[in-house]
Image: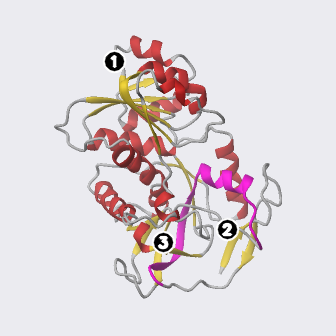
């Protein structure tokens, strides 16, 4: 099979960042599905791994979002059959989706939404799992529309995770959803996704909260530059509020949370697959429910740009866009 990988981590994109390689076809065993990749999306985690992690030997294949067709199944597989169209975000400890074929554990896979094409579907898995786990596993937000009204601030809401998080929060909870964005096109995007108020994270958030006649927030989810926003987060969150984050702050002074008794929650969507947790199948279950929400029109794809076929040139382009921090929605590649 053909795959796109690299031999050495490259901090800066260059001619050695990606190369086409030929590998033997993998064999499905146990809970594994062998999936023929139809489309992928590229995420910030791809750029971080490429920049910092060299393979132990040979090539490293990255990519953690895919839609494809099941070509073979392991002897313990019970959830899928050959021919099923599936979508998933994969496992950080295994070869990624930048390949014609990939092995993936059925317990982190869902049947793809019937109403979306491959490119639209590939935009969803990683960010949807992250957003879902943030809201319902980490912060334990109620999914009842009759729950006590509460409020959520999402910092960096126009990116990949934020784009699905805003939708899930608006459609499945009784939260007032406030997002942050600093560019006009991002503000327009968040309005389309259903954010009820939009603040500019390049300015003081607490002052803007007052201008919008908003109270302190029950929940804050910080998706980017958490260390830079921490002081403002502490100002805008309620006493005994909950803060969740997904990024990698260079520094983080947790003592700033003490006075308000703010609880801190980390989300890393690879934890379940990396540690083979007892509830690993929860990702299969949420992707299955998400497909139903998409097919009934409750949730829409967050595809931002379709960059063409899966090749070295277009992967380079996707990584460059992500590293510019100017992306909106998801970057998708389709077909070899």
- The residue wearing badge 2 is 61
Disc 1 marks which residue? Answer: 215
Q: Secondary structure at mark 3?
A: strand
> Of label 1 and label 2, which has the lower sequence position?
2
When the figure is inspected, residue 331 is found, relative to residue 284, above or below; the finding is above
Magenta residue check for 38: yes
Q: Position of residue 231 (x, y in %)?
A: 54, 21
Q: For the point 46% across and 16% down, which residue is it? A: 206
Q: Position of residue 154 (x, y in %)?
A: 44, 33
| Residue 135 left/right relative to 62 | left
Q: Label 2 crowding class (10 Å Cα cut-off): few <14, some 14-19, many 20+?
A: many
Tell me which residue sits at (51%, 84%) in the image: 28
For residue 279, say whether it is visible: yes
Residues at marks 1 and 2, CA–CA distance in whole angstroms: 46 Å
Q: Residue at x 23, y 29 (%)?
A: 149
Residue 250 lies in quadrant: top right
Residue 255 percent coordinates (x, y): 53, 26
Q: Nearer the viewer, mark 3 or mark 2?
A: 2
Quarter of the image with the N terminus is bottom right
Disc number for residue 67: none
Residue identified by numbered label 3 = 68
Residue segment shown in magenta: 30-57
């Amino acid at each position: 099979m053909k795959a796109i990988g690299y031999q050495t981590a490259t901090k800066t994109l260059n001619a050695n960042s990606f190369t086409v390689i030929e590998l033997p076809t993998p064999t499905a065993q146990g809970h594994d599905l062998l999936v023929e990749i139809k489309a992928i999306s590229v995420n910030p985690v791809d750029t971080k791994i490429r920049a910092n992690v060299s393979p132990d030997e040979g090539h490293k294949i990255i990519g953690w979002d895919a839609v494809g067709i099941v070509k073979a199944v392991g002897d313990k597989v019970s959830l899928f059959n050959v021919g099923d169209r599936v979508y998933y975000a994969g496992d950080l400890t295994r070869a990624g989706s930048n390949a014609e074929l990939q092995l993936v554990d059925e317990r982190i896979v869902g049947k793809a939404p019937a109403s979306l094409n491959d490119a639209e579907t590939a935009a969803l898995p990683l960010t949807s799992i992250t957003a879902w786990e943030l809201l319902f596993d980490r912060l334990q937000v109620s999914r009842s529309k009759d729950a006590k009204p509460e409020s959520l601030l999402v910092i960096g809401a126009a990116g990949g995770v934020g784009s699905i998080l805003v939708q899930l929060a608006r459609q499945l909870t009784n939260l007032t959803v406030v997002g942050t964005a600093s560019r006009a096109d991002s503000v327009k995007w968040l309005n389309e996704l259903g954010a009820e108020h939009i603040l500019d994270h390049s300015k003081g958030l607490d002052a803007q909260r007052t201008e919008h006649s908003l109270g302190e927030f029950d929940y804050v989810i910080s998706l980017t530059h958490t260390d830079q926003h921490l002081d403002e987060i502490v100002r805008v969150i309620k006493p005994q509020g909950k803060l969740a984050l997904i990024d990698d702050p260079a520094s983080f002074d947790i003592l700033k949370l003490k006075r308000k008794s703010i609880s801190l929650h980390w989300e890393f969507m690879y934890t379940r697959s990396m540690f083979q947790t007892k509830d690993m199948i929860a990702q299969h279950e949420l992707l299955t429910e998400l497909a139903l929400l998409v097919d009934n029109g409750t949730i829409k794809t967050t595809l931002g740009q379709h960059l063409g076929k899966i090749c070295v040139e277009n992967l380079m382009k996707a990584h460059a866009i992500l590293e510019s921090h100017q992306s909106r929605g998801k970057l998708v590649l389709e077909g070899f």
